[in-house]
Amino acid sequence: MDRKDFLRKGLLGTGIFVSSSALGNLFKNEIDELKELDILGFNHLPNKEEITMNTVLHKADSRGDANHGWLHSKHTFSFANYYNPDRMHFGVLRVLNDDKVAPGKGFGTHPHDNMEIISIPLEGDLEHKDSMGNVAVIKEGDVQVMSAGTGILHSEYNKNADKDVRFLQIWVFPNQKNVTPRYDQISIRNVEKKNQFYQVLSPSANDQGVWIHQDAWFNLGKFDKDITTSYTLNQKGNGLYFFVLDGEIEVEGQKLFKRDGFGIWDVDTVNVKTLTDSRILLMEVPMTV
């Protein structure tokens, strides 16, 4: 089955009837897709002025800025019309989009394949529909995952008519291609811990949080001011990428502010200190694609 046949079958399976011209438009999505890019392997090269021997700093105001009216997206890495050869990916972490969607608006039905896609809502309610028959709403306190595998179609809309929805859209290269597509979402409220990192994603279906086809571990943390903690990596050779949701923190001497990103590799344990009340997303990922 070629890609267009898959799209026709998937769309018809969702009860959406489309013409050939409409199918063609799916290939011209300029908002929620990746350009054809060469995979550069051990590539986490930052803007040159922000690199040390084993760290990379991505300041919040240096991200790609795409304002489509109904969608305002900040891209940490190259995505859609934002292209920066120094910002391709951090190991297998390929996409980190900080999205705000206007009331009642959203992403129409579009395809993905061979990517692990994680959504973490920060505010509001995001409605999801896909070609596997899933219809769901995710909100702050939930984590959603899709293994696109051999191919899926999905849409995402702001379910609210009176307020924005804000969420992180994160894409990770899988360690297995052409797997059977799947969807899952969980509430993480019952695993939240104050002043500690708590796991929300791992490689194992039997572990805490959602799971993906990759040796990656994601943790969230909500910390009071002046808390010092540490994180020990689960797998040798992995790197860590910190994304500050709110507040100010210090990681191994580097001060980070709201929406700053900071990657570090060739370490076993990393020390973190909060300078204000803070929320942090911490992503441990393999550094080689």
Image (cartoon, rainbow, N blue to C red):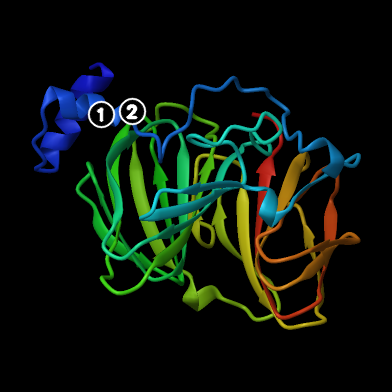
Q: Is residue 5 left or right of residue 187?
A: left
**Badge 1, how many Cα within 10 Å: few under 14, some, many 20+?**
few
Q: Would you place residue 11 above or below residue 200 in this image?
A: above
Structural distance between the alpha carbons of marks 1 and 2: 5 Å
267 lies left or right of 176:
right
Q: Are marks 1 and 2 in contact (CB under 8 Å)?
A: yes
Residue identified by numbered label 2:
28
Q: Quadrant of the C terminus?
A: top right
Which of the 4 quarters of the picture holds residue 9? top left
Give how far across and how far down residue 288 sits, in percent.
69, 30
In the picture, the disc for residue 25 is 1
Type of amino acid at the residue the image marks with label 1? Asn
Q: Position of residue 216 (x, y in %)?
A: 61, 46
Point out the image quarter for the N terminus.
top left
Residue at 46% of width from left, 36% of height from top?
Answer: 115
Please tell me in which quadrant of the rendered image residue 197 appears: bottom right
Give SS at disc 1.
helix
From the viewer's side, name the closer residue of 62 and 143: 62
* Left or right: 3 as drawn, with respect to 226: left
Q: Which mark is residue 258?
A: none
Residue positioned most to the top: 2
Q: Position of residue 69 (x, y in %)?
A: 38, 53
Looking at the image, which residue is at 39% across and 34% down? 30
